[in-house]
Image (tube, grey):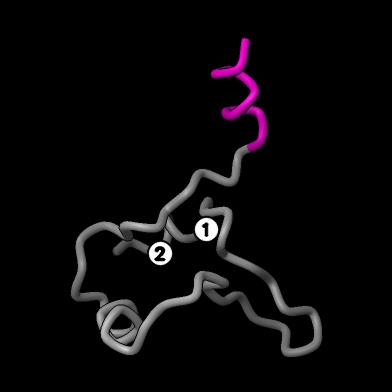
Amino acid sequence: MSTSQCEYCAYYTYDETEDYYYCDMDLDEDEMERFMQNRQEGCPYYRNGDEYEMVKHQM
């Protein structure tokens, strides 16, 4: 999974207290291991966080 994909994901959240980004998706142990080791090619939970992209589909 590329980091750039995570940067545009709706589940990629910034924690102001800890000053870092993290995946806010509730992953099980196996999924988290694959995520941390970058062993999967694409995130099955990726959701585009671009609100304008969503509006285009509603028109």
Given the image, on which type of amino acid does mark 1 rest? Glu
- Judging by the rendered image, the residue that carries numbered circle 1 is 7
Q: Tell me the SS state at disc 2.
A: helix
Type of amino acid under label 2: Thr
Task: State the residue in front, 30 or 43.
Answer: 30
Closer-to-camera residue (27/18): 27
Count the marks.
Answer: 2
* Circle 2 residues within 10 Å: few <14, some 14–19, many ≥20: few
Mark drawn on residue 55: none
Quarter of the rendering occupied by the N terminus = bottom left
Is 18 rendered above or below residue 13? Answer: below
Q: Give the magenta-colored segment's residue range.
A: 51-59
Query: Left of 1 or right of it: where is 46?
Result: right
Q: Which residue is labeled 2 in the image?
A: 3
Q: Residue at x 62, y 10 (%)?
A: 59
Question: Quick check: 36 left or right of 14?
Answer: left
Residue at image point 19% right, 75% down: 39
| Coordinates of residue 38 in the picture (x, y in percent) | 26, 76
For mark 1, give the secondary structure. Answer: helix
Can residue 54 be found in the magenta stretch?
yes
Q: Residues within 10 Å of mark 1 (few under 14, many from 20)?
A: some
The picture places residue 44, in percent across and down from the top left corner, at: 31, 57
Residue 39 sits above or below residue 51 on the image: below
Q: Is 5 drawn above or below residue 21 in the view shown? A: above
